[in-house]
Structures are given as structure tokens and as C-alpha cells.
Amino acid sequence: MLASCEFEIQPKLDTPEELMVVDAFLTDQLGRQEVKITRSQPYFESSKPELITGLSVTLEDLTADVSYALIEGSDSYYLDVSEPIGFVGHEYRLVVETPDETFEAIAKMNRVPGIDSVGYEFNEANFLVDQDHFTAQFYSIDPEGTGDCYWIKAWKNGNYFGKPEELNMAYDASVSPGQPIDGQLFVFPVRAGFINPYTSDDPEISESQPPYVVGDSLYVEIHSIDRAANDFLYALYFQINRMGGFGEIFSSPLSNVSTNIMSTDPGSKTNVAGFFNMSAVSASGRRLTSTVAEQAKTKYYE
């Protein structure tokens, strides 16, 4: 005979240090540019972090010697941009002034390749998808010269692929510095690996979006990021996208991710979190019309 027992425990966690968290990924696009500044929360806290109010937030273009004062809103500090303020090659500084201390971060806006096109390919039913369907990918060539980093974002029918496991990063034309490919078409995992949803009977891996069918659309953006932002996002990914269950004992311990937000006081002991980055953006999209679908079925790609 076999017997087992189960004990329920309620661990008591020490109250963590409260950090100021700065989310400042800005771009060269027109429209609203936002910087969200909140306070960190306890591990089991599930409410939405609230904006820290009463701060002075400034974006400085150090190359052009121009500064922009951000406006305090309900959930962010923002700029409504009607003319470009982001330029490739320019260096920028973000300054956050609190009643007690001033913090700043430096970032350079790097180049970004254009997107040549977005295409679809017809696929018959297979072991992954039990119906005929289409897969999508974008086509873009990394410019020559090593060290370019990118964050690829995609939307299907206006719905953002924003889950932790859908983070799509590229180092030059490949996925990481350990696989150097420069000045070529982005490798297939970058072009298509995170923009093609699949359905599954397994509730643990089931996606909310089915494969592409006629009428669907795909919109893709490539954001240039610097190497420090690339490392920050990967570190954040490994902290958020946890295995869970038995496999969690093999995961790296939870820890705060590095930041480029620093106090201007050399003797400061105040800890902050978050990151500041300036991105140049290229974008393209395409709808899977009946005409495009027929072309894909005959292996004709535009």
C-alpha cells in the first residue's frame, strides 16, 4: 500500500525595499510618448502600480541641445509629439527629479532596417494544426556592421503579441551574439517564430489566437535598441517567464534586473529599477485577402 500526506504552508516574507521603477522606452514616432514611473510592489501584490506624482521629468537631446518637459498625466508622464524629436545617431538623457534626489539615464538612438514586405504561406493540416492554414513572416535585411540590436513587435488583427514567451529579439540578423550573422536577411526564428499563433488541446499551451485565415492582418514593427537595453530585456524575460512546477527548482533565482537609471549623487544609496531607451522604428503590415491567399496556395510570394 502507498500513502502520502500534504502540508499547506503560509510562508512569511520580509517586507521588500520599495523601489522607484522607470519604464521609459521612447521612439522616433509621432503621437504620445510616455514615461511610466511607479513604485515596486510586494511579490503577491496583484493591483496595478500607481503613478508617482509630483515629479519633474525631462527628455534632453544632447546632440541637438534641446530639452522637452514631460507633462504629468493620470498614469504616465508624457509628450504629445507632432514633429519628430528622435533622430538616429543622437544621444539623449532622461532626467527624473524627485523632492529628495535627481536621477538620470543616457541612451543613443541606433539605426533600424526597413521592412521590405510581409508575406503569407499556405500550409496543409499537420500535427500542430488540424486544419489548412496560413503562416506569416516579415522580410527585412540587417545592415552591415556588427552590434545592432532589435526588439520586434507584432500585432495580429490589432492584438499585440505581448506575452513573456513572445518576446522577439534580434542581434544583427540572428537571435543572439552567440550566433553571429551580419548584413543578411533576418533568420527564420526572428522573421516568423513569434508571430504565428497555434491552437492546442493542452490548456497549458493553448493560445488565444488561431492560425491565420483569410481576412486576418499582421502588422510588424522593428525597434532599434542598444546593447544594454537588449541585455535588460533578456534578463527581464528570464525573471518573468518562469517554468513553474518541478522544473522551477532548476531556474535561476529571482532577482532585480540591472538598470541604467542612476542617481546624480555619487554617494546615493537609493535603489531604482527600470530602463531608458530611444528607438528608431520601421513598420509594415498586410492583410491576408482572398487574392493573397490564392497566390500563397500556388507558392507565389510577393
Image: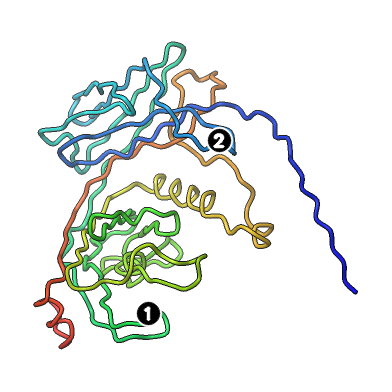
* Location of residue 67 in the rendering, given as x and y in whole percent from the top left corner: 22, 23
Give me the residue at 54% from left, 49% from top: 239
For marks 2 and 1, give the CA distance: 38 Å
Is the residue 34 above or below the residue 201 in the image?
Answer: above
Q: Using residue 119 as the reference point, say whether residue 146 is left or right of it.
A: right
At which x and y percent is residue 222? 25, 55
Dot 1: what SS? Answer: loop
Residue 33: give x, y in percent of width and height: 24, 34
Q: Tell me which residue sits at (44%, 73%) in the image.
A: 200
Badge 2 element: loop
At which x and y percent is residue 5? 84, 58
Q: Nearer the viewer, residue 36 or 58?
A: 36
Query: Is residue 125 left or right of 235 when viewed as pictured?
Result: left
Is residue 245 shown above or below 65?
below
Image quadrant containing the N terminus:
bottom right
- Amino acid type for the residue under numbered disc 2: Glu
